[in-house]
Image: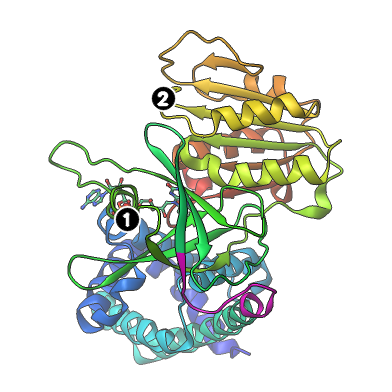
Amino acid sequence: MLSQKTIEIVKATAPVLQEHGNTLTRHFYDRMFSHNPEVLPYFNRANQTAGKQQAALASAICAYAANIDNLGALKEAVELVAQKHASLQIKAEHYPIVGENLLASIREVLGSAATDEIVAAWGEAYGFLADILIKREDQIYREAASVPGGWQGFRRFVVSKKEQESSVVTSFYLTPEDKGSLPSFKPGQYITVRVHTDDGQTTMRQYSLSAKPNSDWLRISVKREDGVGGTVPPGYVSNLLHDSLAVGATLEVAPPCGEFFLQDEENERPLVLIAGGIGITPLMSMLQTSLQTYPNREVAFIHGCQNEDVQAFKTTVEELKAQHDNLNAHFRYIDPQKPLDSNGIEASKGFIDEKLIETMISKRDAEYYYCGPTAFLAKIHRLLNAWNVPHAQQHFEFFGPKEELAALA
Ligand code: FAD
């Protein structure tokens, strides 16, 4: 247990850390990468450049400080971090590296305001949280390895099939190189792929599993991230996968992880799946699973995207709609390029909004799963909050470091 004195010091210094949050976390990452370059492969450089990783850490530190006497309030946040860490194979030996650099950064950024007593209190608080995460992550690793077909660390997979889903999205069907069996996973979960970079390092990215669990392959569907003019470089891994990962090539994959998944016990309420762009991937797995497992459950599926050319899984959703009377689906295009002739599924122009969702469901008391760009998540979150949809009935996933939807909404 944390001492009462530590709790008091951490709570008392929380506002100061909040004030300096982004400066502190920027300093921290710069410091850690120069003192401990061995941790670089665990981080996405593009997220560093955009400042998302720093902002996510700053808000996590502030949330921890604010709730240090009520850690139950952080249960979900801890699970999210533990799942992300486990997906990246972060281990107990990494925690002292982060701890040392964090405490040194507190001293370096706050100067004389960071007394020995304050730094010692934060050291104790960090160690306490690290301990919780290490134990949970160890449990996740053991579970992933012990389920039938499961594994630990990275396993080599062969690309057995490549399928173009749209002008920007390609699916990769992955089968174990060792020809062993595959584990089941929870629809909505993701795997991590590790690739080699030009400078001899490795880097990792998460990709949602885009089909329901099956015994033959894991499928990921990757959007090619183009650069912008000469100013924004193209996405590293998505382009590498699109351009260089041919059928027969191999890829290192860590086991399925994630806390955004279809909850089995909630099947009494209607299921509402709302996707923005490539955010459709985890929802496809949920859609296929739900239709198979609960053939009578009311399901609404909405996919919003730029236009039909970039839209992935259009035909698959049309086929599912033709087979399942309990599915109500709608495509919404920001800038449609073709006449809005529906192939069994209504389509319309614009952004996903309250009116559309309202027309798709029989009642607001439903289970909502949504995934897409941050602005899209913030909009849906704001809308569902205005409908008083309880937090427990709202499930969403970020395709990057977690951001504060409440702040954006
Ligand atoms: P990065 O190199 O990481 O770049 C990211 C973005 O930043 C790109 O748009 C790039 O153009 C831009 N950028 C790069 N360098 C700079 C710079 N110096 N300055 C400014 N901008 C820069 N993606 C999918 O396609 N399908 C999925 O199913 C999927 N599931 C995911 C699930 C989870 C849980 C998470 C966290 C992410 C998921 N992603 C998914 C996103 C995926 O992990 C990658 O982030 C994505 O493919 C981009 O990676 P990249 O290496 O191509 O781009």
Look at the image and tell me in which quarter the N terminus lies.
bottom right
**Per the image, is 154 magenta?**
yes
Q: Name the residue under label 2.
A: 309
Image check: 53 left or right of 108? right
Q: Which of 106 and 184 is in front in this view?
A: 184
Q: Nearer the viewer, residue 304 or 210?
A: 210
At label 2, the amino acid type is: Asp
Please tell me whether mark 2 sits on a helix, a strand or a loop: loop
**Per the image, is 29 magenta?**
no
- Residue 362: give x, y in percent of width and height: 80, 25
**Residue shown at 57% from the left, 16% from the top:** 347
> What colouring style does the render use?
rainbow
Magenta residues (range): 143-157
Residue 402 in sight from this viewpoint: no
Please tell me whether mark 1 sits on a helix, a strand or a loop: helix
**75 over 55 or under it: above or below:** below
**59 over 328 or under it: above or below:** below
Local packing at callout 2 (Cα closer than 10 Å; few below 14, some 14-19, many 20+) is: some
Residue at the limit of the structure toward the left, as seen here: 230
Q: How much space separates mark 2 and mark 1, taking CA atoms?
A: 22 Å
At label 1, the amino acid type is: Val
Ligand 1 within 8 Å of disc 1? The answer is yes
**Residue shown at 58% from the left, 62% from the top:** 258
Q: Mark 1 points at which residue?
A: 237
Q: Nearer the viewer, residue 377 or 382?
A: 377
**Residue shown at 43% from the left, 89% from the top:** 93
Image check: 31 left or right of 278? left
**Residue shown at 44% from the left, 74% from the top:** 13
